Amino acid sequence: MSDRALKFSSKGHFYEESLLMLWFTADWCGPCQQYIPTINAIAKHYQGQVKLLKIDVDNFQGVAQEFGVRAVPTLVLMNKEGVLHSLTGVRTARQLSDWINPYTINDSQ
């Protein structure tokens, strides 16, 4: 992902999906690496509703600052108008579903 390709800001996003989930991570972060299977499962489950973008905080420090990221992993959920909510730390797939479902069109499991 290059800065020119960014289709989002803290004020909203321009992707087809109604929701955007930003995953702020780093290669050196052990919990972030352990989070990969959970994040991939969530992305697959919400395919078509939630667009997932993985953002390395070392490569995109300005983006991390804009969203107030102080620790990784951090997830930011946003709609086309702006940030809805954020979570810091590792969560289970069920916890992430419970976090996302109130913002989805249908919250079927």
Image: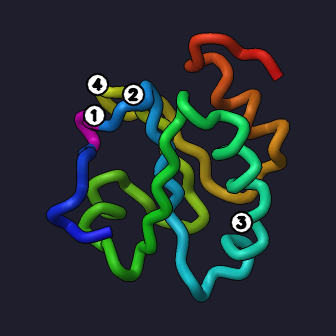
Residue furthest toward the bottom?
Answer: 28
Q: Which residues are magenta?
A: 10-14
Tell me: residue 12, above or below residue 36: above
Specify the quadrant that holds the N terminus. Answer: bottom left
Query: Type of residue at label 4?
Result: Glu
User: Where does the image place residue 21, in percent across and percent down from the top left?
Assistant: 50, 44
Name the residue that disc number 3 marks: 36
Contact between labelled residues 4 and 2, with CB atoms less than 8 Å apart: yes
Q: Specify how the rendered protein is coloured.
A: rainbow
Disc 4 and disc 3: Cα gap in Å? Answer: 27 Å
Q: Residue at x 43, y 30 (%)?
A: 17
Q: Which residue is mark 1?
A: 12
Report the amino acid beneath label 1: Gly
Q: Earlier in the sequence, mark 2 or mark 1?
A: 1
Callout 2: SS: strand
- Residue behind mark 2: 79
Q: Residues within 10 Å of mark 1 (few under 14, many from 20)?
A: some
> Which residue is identified by label 4?
81
Rendered location of residue 50, percent (x, y): 53, 35
Q: Earlier in the sequence, mark 4 or mark 3?
A: 3
**The disc labelled 2 sits on which kind of residue?**
Asn
Q: Which residue is at 78% across, 16% downward?
A: 108
